[in-house]
Image: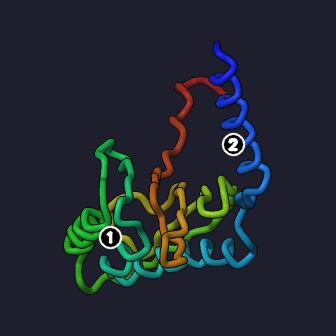
Amino acid sequence: MSRLAQAGASLMTAIALTACATAEPMPMMGTAEDEAAIRAQVTAYANAWAAKDAAALAAITTEDYEAVNPDGTKLTGRAAVQEMVAAEMAMMPADVTMGLSATTEYLEWMSATHAVAGGTWSATGMPAGAGPDRGAWMSVFRKDADGQWRMSHGMSAPYMPPPAPPAGTTP
């Protein structure tokens, strides 16, 4: 390598190191207010579901939301969330009052603008045969440009009781 090329490479390295040294480090976790906002979104989700309000539920998700449903189908986008929830709610009898409670068992920071959280859920007032009444959930939350925390990815799994032991065995 020529001396001119070496000098150029050295100069570029010095500039890069200086830029790295003077740049503000990105915080690796959110604030207590951020955590409270995420936990509030979980409650808002449960309330929107219980109210059969597909628009309010979809508003809690990002425009580019992605999820895998328990049946293995992929859901992409806020509009798809609203459409799916509206279709599910339309199948429920109008006179049925449902409730949903959700707990947040953990919240782990991936960065100041992304967190993963999960917990359990339970539904009340479900008509017989309408589906599971409890399970677990996990979501990635992202702080959008407007400062609001929304779900960007999610997964829910219904509780599945373990199979009965074979006849003649003791657990």
Q: Position of residue 40 (x, y in %)?
A: 59, 78
Residue that sits furthest to the top in the current view: 1
Q: Which quarter shows the N terminus?
A: top right
Query: Is residue 168 positioned above or below 90 on the image?
Result: above
Which amino acid, by three-letter code, is at mark 1? Pro
Residue at x 60% of width, y 63% of height: 113
SS type, badge 1: loop
Left or right side of 123 for 129: left
- Depth check, front residue: 6 or 24: 6
User: Which residue in the protein does label 1 denote?
Assistant: 127
- 1 vs 2, front mark: 2
Q: CA distance from mark 1 to mark 2?
A: 63 Å
Left or right side of 78 for 15: right
- Depth check, front residue: 4 or 19: 4
Report the disc number at residue 81.
none
Residue at x 25% of width, y 62% of height: 80
